[in-house]
Image: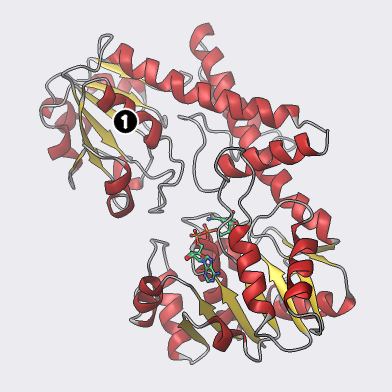
Amino acid sequence: MKIAMIGTGYVGLVSGVCFSDFGHEVVCVDKNPAKIEMLERGEVPIFEPGLDRLMERNVAAGRLSFTVNLAEAVKGAEAVFIAVGTPTRRGDGHADLSYVFAAAEEIAGCVGDGTVIVTKSTVPVGTNRKVAEVVAKANPSLKFDVASNPEFLREGAAIDDFMRPDRVVVGVSSDRAQELMGEIYRPLFLRDFPIVYTDLESAEMIKYAANAFLATKITFINEIAALCERVGADVKSVSKGMGLDGRIGNKFLHAGPGYGGSCFPKDTSALARIGQEHAVPQQIVETVIKVNEEVKRRMLEKLRDLCGGSFNGKKITVLGVTFKPNTDDMRDAPSLTIVPALIGGGAKVAVVDPQGRREGEGMLPGVEWVEDPYEAASGADALVILTEWNEFRALDLQRIAGAMASAKMADLRNVYAAEDARAAGFEEYVAVGR
Ligand code: NAD
């Protein structure tokens, strides 16, 4: 099967590479020539574990190629996937669909009859039908189908998520589209991974509902964590005790500095807007958005207390700035709220992050980037763990404490035990919900 993938970001590139590994012939398109040049040289423009090897293997097998030329890429393709960004539109919190519709219009002029145009980007309910309208308007004689195929992969574990998904969701409005989508995902189906076929609207809704639910779960435990701090409970025990209940589950139940990333903030905000527009306000989601902002504010208060009431003149070392470990993605990371507030309060901030520097340098002006956590902690007044990279999970705490001007730690991911930190020489150790 010949497939074209429009957009080679975190989702488009992983999907394109994985489809080629299924045995399909995939051409990946991006309008950013710098990305395509890198891909043609065999370099991966993002950090995603394992992607380089899988890409190399499929390029070598002749099943995977890259181009900026959309017309050429979609020629003869039976399925064309749209995997472009849908960021928050400035001003109103809605998903910005301009990239999706621009791609649809471009595709319309270049594909042949019988093509299925599949939207993989996260898009509000009704978008797939609008994509069909855009295509029909641009090329009235074209015979085509649309399909909705939202993506659930997690950055940092994207290949495994794509190859071993909890489920694949496919929204269709024709048998032909369902058949073709079944053919594309057949290798997964054969290995018993469930495929949920549904209508276009339900598929679009599943993605937003799933993300909003996960954001709610995180925010729920973050709010419980705040209460734990007041009443003397330990949120780690609370999470464990809750999560062992099969109806609740232990995932997304770790207290921390608030959710961030390229999906939850924008998708919760878009869902809230969709609800308002249809006069069915999503009150839980609206509250989650508000509480998540409060969580970040509470983290800053915690840090200010740790620094004796003011950041002014303090040297603060921040470990981890990407929104989670194993990715270089900085979009809407909690660090983008916390670090500028530290600097704004007069602190000197040193940052260590295994992959965040390339993107983070432009987003966090005024910080000093250091490779080594021990060097970064030297002479510091406070150490903040903001992203739980493996590199920060087994630090020699004694060495760190010994190198600091005053050994104080804010462990905002609950990586360490208070007793261990104190035994290692930390005079103050604060965590979340403990
Ligand atoms: P991204 O910003 O990393 O990548 C989008 C790419 O599309 C960019 O490289 C851009 O240059 C390219 N592009 C835009 N318009 C184009 C056009 N007309 N022709 C060719 N290329 C074009 O975005 P992403 O993180 O991969 O997300 C893509 C979509 O998938 C979004 O809707 C997002 O919500 C959804 N999603 C993302 C994740 C994730 O973890 N990142 C997970 C699930 C779903």
Measured along the vertical axis of the image, is residue 251 above or below residue 315? below
Expressed as whole percent of the image width and height from the top left, the position of residue 200 reads 82, 61
Residue picked out by circle 1: 340
Q: How is the image coloured?
A: secondary structure
Picture quarter containing residue 350? top left
For this rendering, which residue is in front, 217 or 414?
Answer: 217
Measured along the vertical axis of the image, is residue 131 above or below residue 55? above
Left or right position of 169 against 417: right
Measured along the vertical axis of the image, is residue 133 above or below residue 326? below
Left or right position of 16 against 212: left
Picture quarter containing residue 174? bottom right
Residue 365 in view here: yes
Q: In the rendered picture of this protein, how many numbered marks are placed on residues?
A: 1
For this rendering, which residue is in front, 329 or 89?
Answer: 89
Q: Amino acid at mark 1?
A: Pro
Residue at position x 60%, y 80% in the image: 4
Expressed as whole percent of the image width and height from the top left, the position of residue 236 reads 51, 26
Residue 195 in view here: no
Ligand 1 shown in quarter: bottom right
Residue at position x 51%, y 48% in the image: 262
Expressed as whole percent of the image width and height from the top left, the position of residue 362 reads 29, 47
Left or right position of 288 against 115: left
Residue at position x 61%, y 67% in the image: 102
Picture quarter containing residue 16? bottom right
Local SS, label 1: helix
10 Å crowding of disc 1: few (<14), some (14-19), many (20+): some
Expressed as whole percent of the image width and height from the top left, the position of residue 130 reads 77, 62
For this rendering, which residue is in front, 36 or 181?
Answer: 36
